[in-house]
Amino acid sequence: MRITYGPWGETLEELAAAARAAEAAGAEVIWLPELHRSATVSAAAVASATSRAGVGTAIALAFTRSPMIIALEALDLDELTGGRFTLGLGSGARRLNENWHNARWEKPLAQLRETVEVIRTIVAKAHTGEPLEYDGEWQRLRVRGFRRPYQPVREAIPIYLAAVGPQLTRLTGQIADGWISHELSSPAYLRQHVLPNLLHGLERAGRDRDRLDVVVSGCCSIDPDPAVARRRAAGVLGFYASVATYKDFFAFHGLAEEHAKVVAAFRAGEPPVVPDHLIDPLVLAGTPEQVAERLAAYRGLADTVKLTPAGYGNAPEEIRANQSRIIALIRELTS
């Protein structure tokens, strides 16, 4: 398995420094999320701070920018990284798109398929002067007389998709270069739910398994005291459990009742209570030795592991200490 990392920083300078440290420790890709920062701007900051590791968005929201802007940003980031960039896209939830971004979120499966097709068209042809045309149900492109006056590093940039539900996971197997999980994905869920759907999509498209990079994300909390590590991860569990879309995910792990309580607390404006038995199956929490053992359970299932420090609800000094321990573990695992 490749070991990769999603760094944290209170400033972009600190984010870039964490990326450099992770690269030096052996992380093969540095991933940047989109919530409190722009994924593409963060990726640009990290691109200039690293020289060997890949740089990817995990994920950028697919429907809040036009496909043209996404494609141009991807081309620029591929140039900045010298061909090390991976474009990770996700649909996001309806509430996030409509209430936060005033973006259209209808039939996300069809929208995402067409968005990926348009982005690939622009990346491949924007420098040639050929007409850029696409006529879909959700995406339309009519560009004539345009030629991007810069030679691209590559005419095809890898596109990974984030997927939770079965239909979107199957689509990922059909069209994407990689699949990215959210920060909670147990080996059992990967084996029984995700991989069968990815393989279904691959088979439907006539693609081999080695055409798809399976990236499992792990919210990671390391401490000499396992109880401290678990409580530090509680905020991340509370964040994901507050999203009704993940109902089936929690039910799969026998946590439907706990999930319903967290959703109810969120809707009532109350802080969710996250019990330890909700944390243990879904988060990489514990001592360095315990986390390394948990990571080993993904071998043979995932091609890549993306580690991220538990952030929600934790003070910056706590996140920094945890991040340092994770980067130390990466160095140990890759040496």
Image: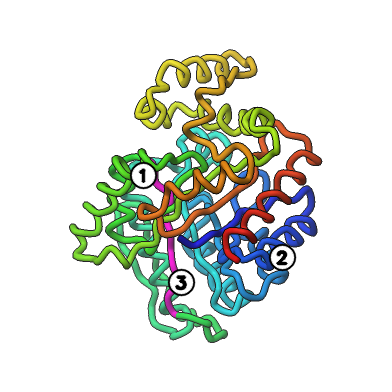
19, above or below 232, in the image: below
Q: Nearer the viewer, residue 93 or 271?
A: 271
Q: Quadrant of the N terminus?
A: bottom left
Q: What mark, if any, has residue 157 been given in the picture?
A: 3
Q: Quadrant of the C terminus?
A: bottom right
Callout 2: few (<14), some (14-19), or many (20+) C-alpha neighbours within 10 Å?
Answer: many
Residue under circle 2? 20
Q: Decide which of tag 1 and tag 3 comes sooner along the chain.
A: 3
Mark 1 secondary-structure assignment: helix
Q: What kind of residue is marked 1?
A: Leu
Q: In which quarter of the view is residue 215 placed?
A: bottom left
Residue under circle 1? 190
Q: Nearer the viewer, residue 333 or 139?
A: 333
On screen, residue 60 versus residue 114, left or right, reads: right
* Residue occupying image coordinates x 72% and y 62%: 21
Residue 157 percent across, percent down from the top left = 46, 72
Callout 3: few (<14), some (14-19), or many (20+) C-alpha neighbours within 10 Å?
Answer: many
Q: What kind of residue is marked 2?
A: Arg
65, above or below 222, in the image: below
Q: Decide which of tag 1 and tag 2 comes sooner along the chain.
A: 2
Residue 242 percent across, percent down from the top left = 53, 26
**Are dots 2 and 3 in contact, CB under 8 Å?**
no
Q: What kind of residue is marked 3?
A: Ile
Estimate the spatial distance between the alpha carbons at disc 1 and disc 2, rounded to whole Å: 30 Å
Estimate the spatial distance between the alpha carbons at disc 1 and disc 3, rounded to whole Å: 26 Å
